[in-house]
Image: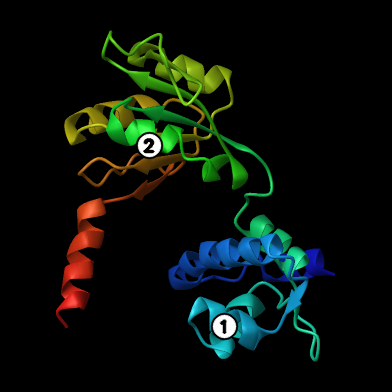
Amino acid sequence: MADNRMKDNKDKEISRAIIKRLPRYYRYLGELIDEGVEHISSSGLAHIMGVTASQIRQDLNNFGGFGQQGYGYNVKNLYDEVAKILHIDRIHKIVIVGAGNLGHALAQYANFERRGFDIVALFDRDEKVIGTTVGGKPVYAIDELTKFVNDNEVEIVALTIPKEAAREIAEKLKDTNIKGILNFAHTDLHVSENITVENVHLTDYIMRLCYKMHE
C-alpha cells in the first residue's frame, strides 16, 4: 500500500522545507528503533522532535501518510519508508577529494555507512599522503579521480579543498558519471544539470547561530 501511495505522490512538488526535515525524521526514528519502540503517535513523535503533531502529519501526508488512526506509526515501517523517499535504502558510493583535517573527519565518521553511504577512497595532491589510508580507505593521487569514479560507479564526490581547487575539480567532474557533489569549499558551485550540488558553508551556520543568540 505504501508503495502505491508513494507512486501517487511522486509527481507532487514537495517543498524544500519538507525535504530538509526528512533526515530529522529518519534520525529520530532510528533512535526509537534502537530503544526498542515499535509504534508511536504523531503527538509522541512531535514531542521528542520539538515540532507539532500537525506538522508531522502534513509532512508525511505528502508521501502517503503511513499512519493509522488510533494506532499511530509503525516505527520500523516509517523508518524504511522515509529511507525510500530519501533514496538511502541502498548503498551510495562516495569519494572525498582532500585528505586534510575535514577529509579525515568525514572518512572516519561511522554514521555514514549506517545511513547507506560507503566512502570508498580519498584523493589528494600531497605526495606525503598518497598511498596511505584514512579510516581504512586508500588515498590516491588527484589525477586518478575521474577514471576511478567512472570505473567504480561512484555517485557522490565530497570536496574538502580550497575554493580555487574545488572549481577546477568540479569542471573535471562534468564529464564523469557522478550524480552529486557535497561541496565544503568556501564557494558556491554550479556544475551541470546532470550533477546536483549541495554547498555546505559551515561559517554560514555559525553566523545564523550568532544572529539567533542575540535576537
**Which numbered disc flags the more N-terminal residue, 1 or 2?**
1
Residue to which mark 1 is pinned? 46
Quadrant where the image shows the N terminus? bottom right
Tell me residue 139's x, y (percent): 41, 16
Residue designated by label 2: 105
Callout 2: helix, strand or loop?
helix
Labels in figure, total:
2
Q: Nearer the viewer, residue 92 or 16?
A: 92
Residue 33: x percent and y percent? 70, 63
Q: What residue sits 47% from the left and 15% below the top? A: 147
- Residue at x 20%, y 44% (from the top left corner): 186
Q: Residues within 10 Å of mark 1 (few under 14, many from 20)?
A: some
Label 1: state its secondary structure.
helix
Snapshot quadrant of residue 141: top left
Taking the view exactly as shown, the residue that stands out farthest to the front is: 35
Name the residue nearer the viewer: 14 or 74: 74
Residue at x 60% of width, y 56% of height: 86
Mark 2 packing: few (<14 Cα in 10 Å), some, or many (20+)?
few
Q: Amino acid at mark 1?
A: Ala
Q: Please state the horizontal and vertical placement of residue 39, each as a whole percent of the image.
A: 76, 75
Q: Is residue 193 above or below residue 81?
A: above
Q: CA distance from mark 1 to mark 2?
A: 32 Å
Q: Residue furthest right?
A: 1
